[in-house]
Amino acid sequence: MANNIEFTNIEPTRFVSTTSRYANSRVLYYSEENILTFETYKKNKYNITKDDKVSVIPQSMQYRPDLVSIERYGTVDFWWKIMEVNNISDILDFKAGKTIVLPDNIYG
């Protein structure tokens, strides 16, 4: 039996910041218990631009995309975007010596 899904008109930013990967997701009720949740996030394809920065992960930031986000963007909020742009899905693959792209336009 399939679970019931009912989309709402609730703004996702009532629950997450505007920098969250879920900020543009639809909010829905899931299952017969009406659990409030977000629509499944789907990774976006990123096209590298000439304004993007290429960097090598230093030893001090191994496994810590949040620290790279702070250094590049002044906030931890974009750790997930760094991982997505570089097609890294496991934090253990965020290793020192790996070359990564740091998007100029974090919202792109």
Image (cartoon, grey):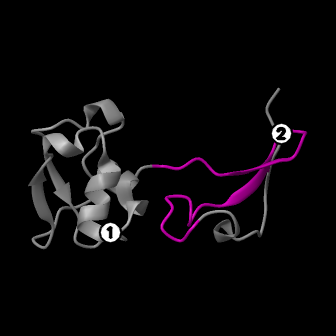
Q: In this rendering, would 70 be left or right of 22?
A: left
96, above or below 71, in the image? above
Rendered-image quadrant of the N terminus: top right
Q: Quadrant of residue 52?
A: bottom left
Label pair 1/2, CB-CB below 8 angstroms: no
Please tell me whether mark 1 sits on a helix, a strand or a loop: loop
Query: Mark 1 vs mark 2: which is more N-terminal?
Result: 2
**Residue at x-position 87% and y-position 46%:** 34
Total marks in image: 2
Q: Mark 2 — residue? A: 31
> SS at mark 2?
loop
Name the residue rendered at 23%, 39% in the picture: 62
Highlighted range, magenta = 17-42
- Which residue is at the far right? 32
Viewer-closest of 99 and 40: 99
Q: Cα distance, mark 1 to mark 2?
A: 34 Å
Quadrant of the rendered image containing residue 108: bottom left
Height in image: 98 above or below 20?
above
The disc label shown at residue 106, or none = 1
Residue drawn where x is 12% and y is 40% of the image = 98
Please check the rendered image and state whether residue 57 is part of the magenta-colored stretch, yes or no: no
**What secondary structure predominates along the stretch shown in magenta?**
loop
Q: Residues within 10 Å of mark 2 (few under 14, many from 20)?
A: few
Q: Amino acid at mark 2?
A: Ser
Q: Position of residue 68 (x, y in %)?
A: 26, 55
Q: Position of residue 72 (x, y in %)?
A: 24, 66
Q: Characterize the local packing of mark 1: few (<14), some (14-19) or many (20 or more) Cα atoms within 10 angstroms.
A: few
For the residue pair 48 and 88, the one nearer the viewer reads as 88
Q: How far across and how far down the image is residue 25, in percent? A: 59, 61
Relative to 56, residue 74 above or below: below
Three-letter amino acid code at the position of disc 1: Ile
Residue drawn at point x = 83 percent, y = 39 percent = 31
